[in-house]
Amino acid sequence: MRKPVLIASLLLISATLFPQSEKKLVILHTNDLHSRLTGYAPESAYTPLTINDDKTVGGFARISSVINDEKTKNEGITIVVDGGDFLMGTLFHHLEPSTGFQLPLMKEMGFDAACLGNHEFDFGPGKLTEIINSSLLRGEIPSLLLGNALFDRDDPADDTLEELVRRGIIRKTLIIEKEGLRIGFFSILGKVADHNAPYAVPVKFEKQKSAARKLVRELKNENCDIIICLSHSGIGKNRKGEYAGEDIDLARSVKGIDVIISGHTHTLLEQPLTVNGVKIVQTGDYGRFVGRMELTIRDRNVILDNYRLIPVDDKTMGDTGIHDLIEAQKIKVAQEVLAPLGYDFSSPVAENDFGLGCDEYGNVGESNLGPLIADAIYYYVNRHSKSGTDISMVAVGVIRDSIVTGTQTAPDIFRVMSLGSGKDDVPGYALSRLYITGRELKTVLEILLVASRSTPAYHCFYSGLRVSYNPSKGLLRKISSIEIVMPDGTARQVSFSKKDTEFYSLTANSYMLEFIGIIKKMSFGFINVVPKDAEGIKVIDMKTTVIDMSDHLDGVQEGKEWLALMEYLGSMIDTNGNGIPDIDRKYSSAVRTFFPAGD
């Protein structure tokens, strides 16, 4: 009996003389905020300085209050981080290169660090540099992480961004030391996110796992007590309903990571996933929730004590100071972006008593929003361009928000189609038009049908055509007939004959039409679609396909998808007599253009 007593006594003496190091750490985290500075939706209902009187969610004033409240009541250390794509998605982002508003705002809210996601590159590396430099002129910003970027020595287009790395403004790793605890961070931009960042060129991204191993080793050599990866890579459910994805692969393959703050896939995890001992968290998107992870770090052992999602909704009183800063920025946006177009921030555009949505990760074929957007583009181009268009199209991947019930204003409509920029001062990708033969049109539709099975973002909605098809048939054999449907409802048959050289015009945003030009590459040379102009001459530069929406003005007057949607909704009938157009109830369910053969 004496031996166990002796061992217990020695352990007690050891614990007394050499106490274990133990620290409490709370990590507050967000991801994919997409410049949702004001709550949604609709924005006209957002009242952050009062509670329990609206159904909107999110908003930076409310997020700031959550952060301040947590920092006040938490014991130990509190760190606030973001998992990328904090920019791009609302009218606010358009002024970022000149005003640098959001990053200093996030610092004021309490963010310590943020990683750069694919959408931070939407305007290219040069404009991203302008955003960061403008932000630095305004004040302090969160530490920015970009762990696996590779810069091109021979191309000057990324030199200014590389200079920010040399200056330490953008870092591969970050160590925050508080109360003797060394907290190491690094970031990774994932493979899919890399693919979704075409305007990052000439910046490239090192393979994620090999980059992560090097960065973990570096942080270990710096004696970090905990290593956290801000990974703009993501997770999602596979066909079996199990969680899978790049961040799960990262946790399985790279030793030494304790926590992965995930982003990119807009996945809402109510509790962390634990993979190979690594805790993986993600809060969905748009600031609907702030994640709160409570950890104990004891001699390099990281123990999860508690995790919860903090709702950001009308039960939270917003931070008055942050709200006032945003209100001042709204005035600038209204003056510089909306007023020249004849709009303002708060005037009603349309109203609806049914929701319109498009869930990339759900049944995209049942979307009622996609057909509405395609019809809006068709209406807009045929109204403003002398040449009009036979067909308009829009892909799931560029539809960024739903339209919930209520009164819609310009900010609500812009959020639906908020990506990109053109050559003018109006946000959004330019609408472009190219011409293809009937046989090529069939090929494009066939390829998109197949591509959308593995990548739902490629699923397209159309206006101006009617297709008969058999989904069970093989590649390039599914479609049996295509009709071009005129605005008056009449239709004409499309010939698939090689001898038929009649051209059909196809309109979409400039980013999406790039897809038509790379079908040959995607099919390893077996399938070729040649984009042409109205005279049948091969298009070499897709920039030449941008539609001029006003023939009587000098230069090219670009059209935008969100403006098409604004105009189309504004043309609808006011059914209840309150002076606000009502969204046509034909869009209360999916409007189809593809029909099984025989229907």
Image: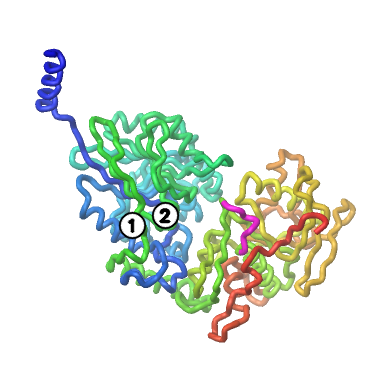
In magenta, the rendered stretch is 362-368
Nearer to me, 455 or 152: 455
Q: Name which residue type carries label 1.
A: Met
Instruction: Report the number of numbered marks.
Output: 2
Nearer to me, 33 or 558: 33
Label 2 Cα neighbours within 10 Å, binned few <14 / some 14-19 / many ≥20: many
How far from the left and from the top, in percent, is residue 151? 47, 41
How far from the left and from the top, in percent, is residue 29? 35, 49
Placement of 442 over or under 1, stated as above or below: below
Nearer to me, 410 or 66: 66
Q: Which mark is residue 106?
A: 1
Q: Quadrant of residue 542?
A: bottom right
Residue 432 lies left or right of residue 268; in this view the side is right
| Residue closest to the far right | 499
How far from the left and from the top, in percent, is residue 239? 58, 41
How far from the left and from the top, in percent, is residue 90? 47, 63
Q: Residue at x 72, y 48 (%)?
A: 447
